[in-house]
């Protein structure tokens, strides 16, 4: 073999090894690493799958039809991901087999496929080939085993998330509304019980931040009912806490402040992962997507319902705006990204209020 041919085999072999190592690193980041980590293979897979689903949604008109299509998006993309890994490993090992003497290229691909899927109908000619086959078989089985172990963890987190979202419908109606939630608590003489709600949702936001960054595809798993969504539920609770804090003339409750802070920290962490641009240090008087006239309508509605309101409406608006500005941008952007169902002050803001994404990162 001449020097050029030997150099070519070395280059092809190294490229094959690199492809396999990149795939293994991708699997570790997605399935094992207990923290958020951007991965190009997973992101590319989810993006391509999203293009197909976007094309399908162009043919439907109602939200219910779009929701039915998007309900399949995350599960399908998650199933396509290991296929992408296996294909990369297949051709990576094909390059390695070709580099160590399995010719022609078609024979190297056949041996790689036989080894990866543990079919055993093709074999090499020496011990080195056999060892490569064993390693490829181990990788193929490991990828499938990791995916099988990954799914129960993800669905367990999904179940805990959706339990709180479902219970919120009892308190905030369907579609959920922060104003409706406050009125319902008032009707049952339970405004003092809101402290318990803020505590529960503070814990929910803490778990949300951990699960929806380390298990990023979980963000795209939609609720069992079309009109429910984790992002609209998060917005309703945050707006509810901000309204009570700014508008109701009640004793100061530190728990609602903690709930809002936990909420916007969680949403910002998820936004960071998906590459959503926002101002991390907004001024209290920066503009928000909620209009003053909309806030005044809520003030009047709660006044008619007999709730104790703070007399200074201007100060109440400044207080609400100062809280909302911390999560306004990320809430609206995530609602758009996830195609959230209709919800007041969340998914009804229109394209002008929706910020552009710096980059769409999915995994």
Image (spheres, helix red, strand yellow):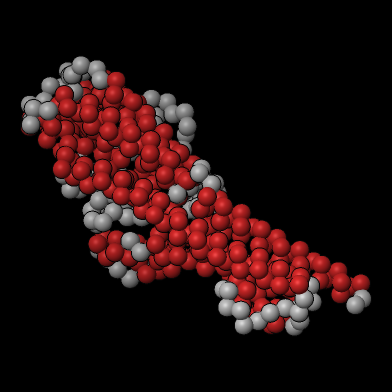
- In percent of width and height, residue 228 lies at 25, 51
Is residue 45 visible to the viewer in this orientation of the structure? no
The one of 31 and 270 positioned closer to us in this rendering: 31
Asked which quadrant contains residue 115, the reply is bottom right
Identified at 30% across, 40% down, the residue is: 234
- In percent of width and height, residue 193 lies at 17, 27
- State left or right for residue 75 relative to residue 189: right
Identified at 40% across, 52% down, the residue is: 154
- In percent of width and height, residue 174 lies at 17, 48
Asked which quadrant contains residue 10, the reply is bottom right
- State left or right for residue 136 relative to residue 164: right
Q: Is residue 29 above or below residue 118?
A: above
Q: Is residue 117 above or below residue 297?
A: below
- State left or right for residue 355 relative to residue 291: right
- In percent of width and height, residue 39 lies at 56, 53
Asked which quadrant contains residue 72, the reply is bottom left
Q: Is residue 288 above or below residue 78?
A: above
Identified at 66% across, 58% down, the residue is: 21
- State left or right for residue 355 relative to residue 203: right
């Amino acid at each position: 073999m001449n020097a050029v041919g030997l150099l070519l085999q070395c280059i092809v072999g190294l490229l094959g090894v690199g492809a396999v190592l990149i795939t293994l690193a991708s699997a570790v980041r997605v399935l094992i690493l207990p923290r958020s980590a951007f991965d190009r293979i997973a992101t590319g897979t989810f993006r391509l799958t999203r293009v197909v689903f976007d094309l399908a949604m162009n043919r439907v008109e109602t939200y219910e039809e779009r929701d039915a299509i998007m309900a399949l998006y995350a599960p399908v993309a998650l199933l396509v991901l290991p296929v992408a890994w296996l294909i990369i490993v297949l051709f990576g090992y094909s390059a390695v087999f070709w580099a160590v003497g399995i010719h022609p290229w078609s024979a190297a691909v056949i041996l790689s496929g036989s080894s990866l899927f543990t079919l055993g109908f093709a074999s090499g000619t020496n011990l080195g080939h056999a060892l490569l086959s064993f390693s490829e078989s181990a990788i193929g089985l490991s990828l499938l085993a990791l995916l099988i172990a990954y799914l129960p963890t993800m669905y367990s987190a999904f179940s805990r998330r959706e339990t709180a979202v479902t219970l919120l419908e009892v308190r905030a109606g369907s579609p959920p509304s922060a104003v409706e939630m406050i009125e319902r608590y008032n009707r049952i003489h339970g405004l003092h019980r809101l402290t318990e709600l803020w505590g529960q949702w503070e814990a929910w936001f803490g778990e949300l931040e951990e699960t929806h960054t380390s298990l990023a595809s979980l963000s795209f798993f939609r609720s069992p009912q079309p009109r429910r969504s984790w992002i609209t539920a998060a917005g309703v609770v945050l707006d509810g806490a901000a309204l009570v804090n700014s508008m109701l003339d009640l004793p100061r409750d530190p728990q609602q402040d903690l709930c809002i802070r936990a909420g916007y920290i969680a949403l910002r962490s998820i936004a960071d992962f998906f590459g959503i641009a926002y101002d991390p240090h907004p001024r209290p008087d920066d503009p928000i997507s909620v209009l003053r006239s909309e806030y005044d309508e809520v003030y009047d509605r709660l006044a008619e319902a007999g709730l104790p309101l703070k007399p200074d409406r201007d100060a109440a608006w400044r207080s609400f705006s100062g809280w909302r500005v911390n999560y306004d941008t990320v809430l609206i952007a995530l609602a758009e990204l996830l195609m959230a169902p209709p919800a007041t002050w969340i998914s009804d803001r229109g394209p002008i209020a929706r910020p552009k994404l710096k980059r769409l990162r999915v995994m």
